[in-house]
Image (cartoon, rainbow, N blue to C red):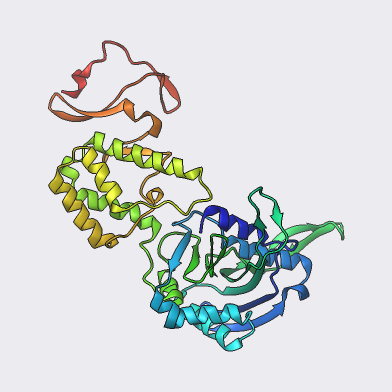
Amino acid sequence: MTEKETAEIRRRLTLEKSSVSRIAGCYVNGDGTPITRFSSLLSSVPQQESEELLAILKKVLSGQPDRNLIDIGFSNDQVLSGEEHKLLMGLRDSALEDDELISELYQKIMSSVKFDEKYLILLALDKYDVPAYGKDDQLLEDTDNVFTYILCAICPVKQTRAALSYSVEEEQFCSLKTGWAIDKPVSGFMFPAFDDRQANIYNALFYVKKADGHFDDLSEELFGTEPPIPADSQKEIFNQIINETISDDCGIEVTKEVHSKLSEMIIEHKAKKDEPSFTISKGVITDLLMECSVPDEKVNDFSGEYDRVFGENVRINPKNIVDVKRFEMKTPEVSIKVDPERLDLIKTAIIDGRKCIVIRVEHDVEVNGVNISIKPEQDNSSLR
């Protein structure tokens, strides 16, 4: 799904726009045993609570593509005969009215999610009459494109503390008692995906609040596919591959060039919200390394290790390995942050036999909030 398509569905999740008919859920103990279940029409829920429920579900469609929002693809075999896909299709087609299928989903979640506290599984079904537009961008009245999908949110339920408050109605101070409050979702999914503004049953959208791999077991249980390497781990793994294969030929100029080129690609794509999430192939990276004069044998070593760790033909989002707003150099004793747009200011050099980071200064230098002067007589004698 593109960012634009995700936003289109997210904007629907209000009382005025959505057609969410049924809300179902299961309240679960920290040990994974159900406390209670519920299923009701959203129209029977008071307005304020309905708005809060939709706000929770909306969170499942928030965050960064390939980091918080992960496209899950189903193979042809899974769509034809896979148990996981059959369950998701059954939930959607039954409009969340098949208790047996709902129980099966709850069981999958409870068997693969680990919490120290209680949590809530929340399910909703929505039907979206997708508007169509003519060549002149005029809205067409007749459309038979109805996008029916389910949303699932998994939310911790946390105990609130007793606190002192003031009651405006009673005009006096009062004590708020402890209670249990539903927190923002930490994981969830949408099925099917909304691709090219229509249902794509070959894909689902999986949500994680933190891209640390904590919900890999849930992803595998729900979709029957091996989850991708968590976004938070991709940079560390990528850097490890670089260190093990080309570090001897990876000077500061190579690092600066790769960072700059990938950053340019990310920024260029960011303006295109109607395109799918931006990923690059291993070939893009190896081409960059070759352009930076890294020896062919080292590039081949990188290619082989990339296939072994990430998998053959696996594409990664460069935002998971490059921060366009940050470029950092580290030694055990020193950390230096550089504006990525001014990488020309830094280089490395051997001075008096010592390895040095050299930073060209064009403006005032501030240390601990104090402007310092650099005098002409301050040469490199202190490096000896």
Which image quarter holds the C terminus? top left
| Relative side of 76 to 244, left or right | right
Residue 178: % across, % down = 67, 68
| Relative side of 164 to 156, left or right | right
Residue displayed at 25% across by 44% down? 287
Determine the image quadrant of residue 357: top left
Residue 87: % across, % down = 51, 81
Can residue 328 be seen at all in this image of the molecule? yes
Nearest the eye: 171 or 158: 158
Can residue 32 be seen at all in this image of the molecule? no
Nearest the eye: 283 or 228: 283
Q: Residue furthest right?
A: 170
Residue displayed at 64% across by 65% down? 160
Q: Residue furthest bottom?
A: 100
Residue 58: % across, % down = 62, 61
Nearest the eye: 148 or 346: 148
Q: Residue furthest top?
A: 376
| Relative side of 217 to 165, left or right | left
Determine the image quadrant of residue 145: bottom right
Nearest the eye: 357 or 235: 235
Residue 373: % across, % down = 37, 16
Q: Residue furthest front?
A: 135
Q: Is residue 333 above or below residue 240?
A: above
Residue displayed at 23% across by 38% down? 291
Tally of marks: 0
Residue displayed at 50% across by 65% down? 205
